[in-house]
Amino acid sequence: MLSPASAAVVRATLPVVRAHAVEITGEFYSSMFAAHPELLDLFNQGNQADGRQKLALAAAVAGFAEHLLAEDTAPFDSIAERIAHKHVSLGIRAEQYPIVGHHLLTAVGTVLGDAVTPEIAAAWHEVYWLLACRLIAAEARLYQRGDLDPADLWRRWRVAKRLDEAVDTVSFTLVPDDGGTVPDFAPGQYVSVAVDLPDGHRQPRQYSLSQGPGRGSLRITVRRVRGHDGTPDGAVSNHLHDHVTEDDILLLGPPAGETTLTSGDGPVLLVSAGIGITPMAAMLDHLTRTQPTRRVVLAHADRSPAHHALRREYAQTATGLAEADELHWYENDHDKHSRPGLMDVDALPLPPGTTAYLCGPLPFMHAVRAGLIRRGLPAEHIHYEVFGPGMLDRD
């Protein structure tokens, strides 16, 4: 909780900070990377290049300040948990938070100049450290729960199998290179994959695990990211597609992610678009092997059948369920379950007690979530996974 004096200052200055937040975060990243180039290996440089990361950080800092002032009644816990899982997947350490805090608060002074009095600086310093302490504590719990050392997080995994799944999509089945154990995980979680690029930089990306636990391996399914409208190609996805084959070694962090299949026996709705099918495939795999009598509805939207990753496996796995509905929407398809480029939420079977899981582009998930709520599904029964800067969005 903010001290009364700091709360008064933050409330008075929040509109100014919010108005300049993107400029502040832009200055922050520039100065921090100049002073600590080693941190470049922890940040998605594609998101840095197109500005999405600074927009996300600006929204997070302003949103947390609003939460502390009770101007925002939405709980911040879910966002903090989401960030903590992402940080643990990358091996973020508590001693790195002072570096971030120093450069972020220095950027506030650089952008706002003499308007930042010692009282204002102290109040926003308090905001930052309240957020930092919450994240450090959450991350410490996750490290302890997984018996993980953040200073020695990355493991070598060997590609046991590479399989083309669809247009621009390939799966990699991975086993520990040292013959060690495969960590347990919850269906819906992801791993960070770090690759060394030709320019000498190491870049991490998060990929959902696309098979359930208990198979003696991990599998990721990667869609090649092609640039458009001036944006660059995805550096890591293209590297994996073009240069990684069987018996090659990849560095993986531990499984992480808070959007996972919950316990219970009620109906399940798995909704995906594009490569968002990957965590749903893990959930489906797990349900088929552990709760085959549970009713499951599978709904997927994609560009075309040729782009539909894991399509045949998905359908085959679903045959192991006593009751399953499978619906597809394709941009070039006009069958009774399809409208071009749009999933018809009203066509989805929605039996009482359904729990829904969504994964896909953020606008898609927002639209599906709104449609499900309109149809009467409680918001707390709708879970969705977001990667990249959109992960900081609220429900």
Image (cartoon, rainbow, N blue to C red):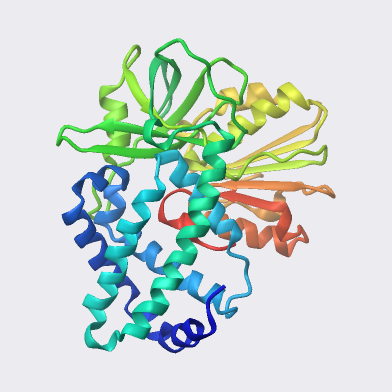
Quadrant in the picture for residue 159: top left
Whether residue 99 sits left or right of residue 83 in the image: it is left
Give the tally of numbered discs: 0
Q: Position of residue 335 (x, y in %)?
A: 61, 42
Q: Nearer the viewer, residue 103 or 156?
A: 103
Residue 358 in the image: above or below residue 210 = below
* Residue drawn 56% across the image and 33% down it: 146
* Residue drawn 85% across the image and 50% down it: 352
Quadrant in the picture for residue 19: bottom left
Q: Nearer the viewer, residue 365 or 210?
A: 210
Whether residue 313 sits left or right of residue 320 in the image: it is left
Whether residue 6 sits left or right of residue 76 in the image: it is left
Task: Name the quarter where the C terminus is drawn.
Answer: bottom right
Quadrant in the picture for residue 183: top right
Q: Nearer the viewer, residue 344 or 198?
A: 198
Task: Name the quarter where the N terminus is drawn.
Answer: bottom right
* Residue drawn 29% across the image and 84% down it: 116
- Using the rendered image of the protein, determine whether residue 304 is visible from the camera's viewpoint: yes
Q: Nearer the viewer, residue 97 or 245?
A: 97
Q: Position of residue 13 (x, y in %)?
A: 40, 86
Residue 170 in the image: above or below residue 136 = above
- Using the rendered image of the protein, determine whether residue 340 is visible from the camera's viewpoint: no
Q: Position of residue 16 (x, y in %)?
A: 36, 85
Q: Position of residue 253 (x, y in %)?
A: 43, 32
* Residue drawn 25% across the image and 23% down it: 243
